Image (cartoon, rainbow, N blue to C red):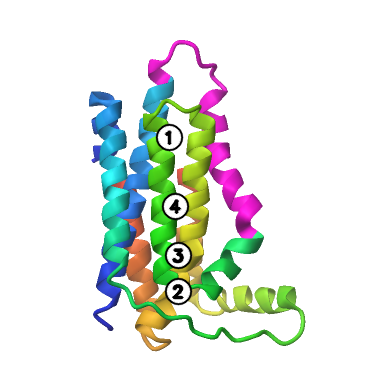
């Protein structure tokens, strides 16, 4: 659909103003989320090894492998 | 699934939509300008991404140590400020870098808040909804 691109082609000022309004709307909606700080678990030992172990878990089942590879391809396509 | 996740889905959709609308707007600004060189568009994208790389060691801790809903608000306000700078004709490389700073602050909080809202039982489902809303926003914008 490229709504943003079409609006930008029509008027840059309108596109920027619209973007600011949308960001503000997102901020206002975020106010409906609960305000709390949860204590996060500390990782024993090396955090890099723990990170590698958790990344490895993503490749443990065919569905998670498919999800990781599909997601990576999408973002790689978006970046190029 | 916890109904508190729906505001997050809407907020994330809107924020991702505006992120991509701004990218296209900045590119349109560059295309309409005769003074800017061909390297400018890649430089713009880099100015956005450099904020992620530079701030990566701190933004996760920032999201952990503050209420994530407030971090989401701060991220959106910084992005809006970046868009405002573009509107005020500030150098696009600087203004778009400010949008990148907002996005870098926003990102860990949007994922970090998921276990708080959905719990571990529905974490995968909640994550898929967030990713789905993001991709839909990107495709629409």
Q: Residues within 10 Å of mark 3 (few under 14, many from 20)?
A: many
| Cα gap from disc 3 to disc 2, whole angstroms | 7 Å
Could you tell me how far apart the alpha carbons at marks 2 and 4 are, in whole angstroms? 30 Å
Residues tagged 3 and 2 counted as in contact (Cβ below 8 A) = yes
Q: Which secondary structure is most common in the magenta stretch?
A: helix
Identify which residue, B131 or B27, lies in the foreground: B27
Q: Which residues are magenta?
A: B31-56
The answer, for residue B55, to whether it is visible in the render is yes
Residue B132 placement: quadrant: bottom left
Disc 4 target residue: A74
Proximity of marks 2 and 4: CB atoms separated by less than 8 Å: no
Residue B79 position in % (x across, y down): 42, 47
- Looking at the rendered structure, which numbered label has been put on residue B71? 3
The structure residue drawn at horizontal position 57% and vertical position 23%, both measured from the top left corner, is B39
Q: Are marks 1 and 2 on the same chain?
A: yes
Q: Residues within 10 Å of mark 4 (few under 14, many from 20)?
A: few
Frontmost of labels 1 and 4 is: 1
């Amino acid at each position: 659909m490229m709504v943003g691109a079409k609006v930008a082609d029509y008027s840059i000022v309108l596109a920027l103003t619209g973007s600011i309004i949308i960001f503000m709307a997102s901020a206002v909606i975020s106010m409906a989320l609960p305000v709390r700080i949860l204590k996060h678990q500390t990782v024993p030992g090396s955090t890099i090894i723990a990170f590698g172990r958790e990344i490895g878990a993503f490749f443990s089942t065919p569905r998670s492998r498919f999800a990781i590879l599909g997601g990576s391809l999408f973002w790689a396509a978006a970046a190029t | 699934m916890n109904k508190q996740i729906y505001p997050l889905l809407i907020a994330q959709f809107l924020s991702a939509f505006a992120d991509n609308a701004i990218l296209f707007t900045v590119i349109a600004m560059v295309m309409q300008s005769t003074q800017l060189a061909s390297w400018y568009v890649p430089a713009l994208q880099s100015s956005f991404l450099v904020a992620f790389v530079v701030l990566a060691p701190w933004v996760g801790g920032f999201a952990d140590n503050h209420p994530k809903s407030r971090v989401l608000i701060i991220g959106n306000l910084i992005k809006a400020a970046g868009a405002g700078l573009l509107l005020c004709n500030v150098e696009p490389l600087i203004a778009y870098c400010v949008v990148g700073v907002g996005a870098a602050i926003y990102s860990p909080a949007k994922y970090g808040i998921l276990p708080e809202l959905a719990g571990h039982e529905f974490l995968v489902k909640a994550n898929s909804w967030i990713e789905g809303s993001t991709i839909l926003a990107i495709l629409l914008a």
